[in-house]
């Protein structure tokens, strides 16, 4: 999971900016901008699963499914690596 934000940058290049991440215990907090929208979230490593939570601005709700899908796909790729 340490490479989550870097994997977003590598996959989406100039479509994402202002990437940041920080760790507190087993929880990774992250944020980035895409198409002018600020996306923030956290991934917590639990015993047998990852708990993913995110904040999407109301104006970006029509992209919610796409954003969630991409985050899940990136996490799955990182967990397989």
Image (cartoon, grey):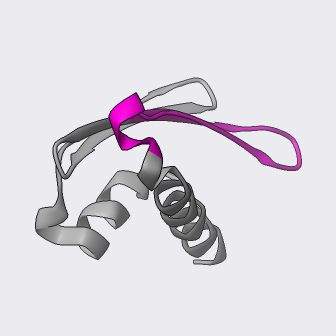
Farthest-out residue, top: 24
Residue pictured at 17% horizontal, 63% vertical = 15
Q: Quadrant of residue 39?
A: top left
Q: Whole-percent x and y of residue 81?
A: 57, 77
For residue 53, above or below residue 1: above
Q: Residue at x 80, y 38 (%)?
A: 46
Q: Is residue 18 left or right of residue 6?
A: left
Q: Is residue 9 above or below residue 54?
A: below
Q: Which stretch is magenta?
A: 40-61
Percent across and percent down for residue 6 are: 30, 59
Q: On the rendered structure, is 7 left or right of 48?
A: left
Placement of 35 over or under 52, stated as above or below: below
Q: Position of residue 67 (x, y in %)?
A: 46, 56
* Residue at the extreme left of the image, as rendered: 14
In-front residue for pair 19/38: 38
Task: Say if residue 57 shows up in the picture.
Answer: no
Residue at 88% in and 49% down: 48
Q: Magenta includes 28? A: no
Asked if one can make out residue 40 in the rendered structure from this viewpoint, the answer is yes
Determine whether, in the image, residue 21 is placed left or right of residue 50: left
Nearer to me, 47 or 67: 67
């Amino acid at each position: 999971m340490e490479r989550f934000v870097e994997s977003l940058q590598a996959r989406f290049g100039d479509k994402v900016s202002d990437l940041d991440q920080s760790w507190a215990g087993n929880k990774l907090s992250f944020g980035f901008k895409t198409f002018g929208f600020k996306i923030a979230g956290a991934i917590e490593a639990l015993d047998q699963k990852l708990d993913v939570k995110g904040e999407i601005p109301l104006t970006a709700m029509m992209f919610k499914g796409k954003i969630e899908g991409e985050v899940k796909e990136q996490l799955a790729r990182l967990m397989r690596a």
